[in-house]
Image: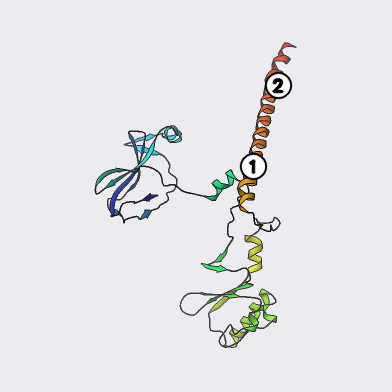
Amino acid sequence: MIENLKDRAITVFAISLRVGHNYYIEIEDLDESPLVLKAYETFDRQYGPIQFYGLNSNKVDLNSLLSNEGIRKRLVLSTSDGKYVVPASIKHWHPVGDFFRNHMTATLRPVRLVHKKTHIGGNVRYIIEFIPLKGEAEVVLIHPMDYELKMFRKFSLTYESLESADSLRNYLQGKMEEGLLDCQNFEVHDVNEWKSRALDFYKGKTIQARYYGFWKYHLLGRVGTLLSNRALKKKNERTQLESQCKQRRLEKAPAEQSER
């Protein structure tokens, strides 16, 4: 991620990572299509894993240098103004950092159900995918009470047709045979079955979120975190000591047997 903090555009021809003073890892060569970063614009790109680093016909092992935090790494840009060394990384904030300082912090992630770029709400019962004679397929979301609405131009759904996916499938097939449903084919999906598979990970109980005031969060939460970290540290030290004692006993046993 590169952020242009200047009030003018800058043209980038290449991006490299300098390791130490003399190693340059080519991140991207942009000579054929230079990157133009507008004023205060941010460039963000992700790269996949590599096999190895090469120099002429040789492989170069950089693992020890890259893993050494004492060796400075800097992004270096080849720009229209010449060589430019990015001074520092862009600072990011994430609530996970707050959690490690205060265990009362919780990061909640929205869990979505998406079918062919269509977001499925929690009250959707069925998904009908119509395949027309011409054009792209159309996705229609059906809710439990949609029999009270005029969902289709030439007919309406019934209470019985929404009792199950098979009932809806048979009902639509009949309307298609009557010539009231203009499409080449259709598919009916039961959203509840999808939910049971897609949301299988969330098997725990539902937690009711509670409000914590300023002092309870910043004072009690912080104190509780310090006590929890201290208890965890003591537990780790005790486990490590027990492991060392066990290792010593295992090393001592063969010596005693040889003496016997």
Are circles 1 and 2 on residues that touch, CB within 8 Å?
Answer: no
Q: Quadrant of residue 189?
A: bottom right
Q: Judging from the image, what secondary structure is the residue with disc 2 in?
A: helix
Residue 54, x across and y down, in percent: 36, 38
Residue 131, above or below 4: below
Disc 1 to disc 2, C-alpha distance: 39 Å
**Which residue: 67% across, 32% down?**
234
Which residue bears the numbered disc 2?
249
Q: What label does residue 142 carry, if any?
A: none
Residue furthest left as drawn: 81
Q: Nearest the camera: 32 or 238?
A: 238
The C terminus, quarter of image: top right
Residue 67, x across and y down, in percent: 46, 35
Tally the marks.
2
Residue 171, above or below 204: below
Q: Quadrant of residue 87?
A: top left
Q: Nearest the camera: 7 or 143?
A: 7
Q: What is the crowding at mark 1: few (fewer than 14 residues within 10 Å), some, or many (at least 20)?
A: some
Image-based side of 204 in relation to 188, left or right:
right
Residue 258, above or below 91: above
Q: Nearest the camera: 195 or 89?
A: 89
For the residue marked with disc 2, what is the amino acid?
Answer: Arg
Image-based side of 185 in relation to 88, left or right:
right
Residue 129, x across and y down, in percent: 56, 74
Which one is earlier in the sequence, the residue at label 1 or at label 2?
1
**Which residue: 53% across, 84% down?**
182
Q: Judging from the image, what secondary structure is the residue with disc 1 in?
A: helix
**Which residue: 58% across, 62% down?**
112
Q: How is the image coloured?
A: rainbow
Which residue bears the numbered disc 1?
223
Q: What is the crowding at mark 2: few (fewer than 14 residues within 10 Å), some, or many (at least 20)?
A: few
For the residue marked with disc 1, what is the amino acid?
Answer: Val
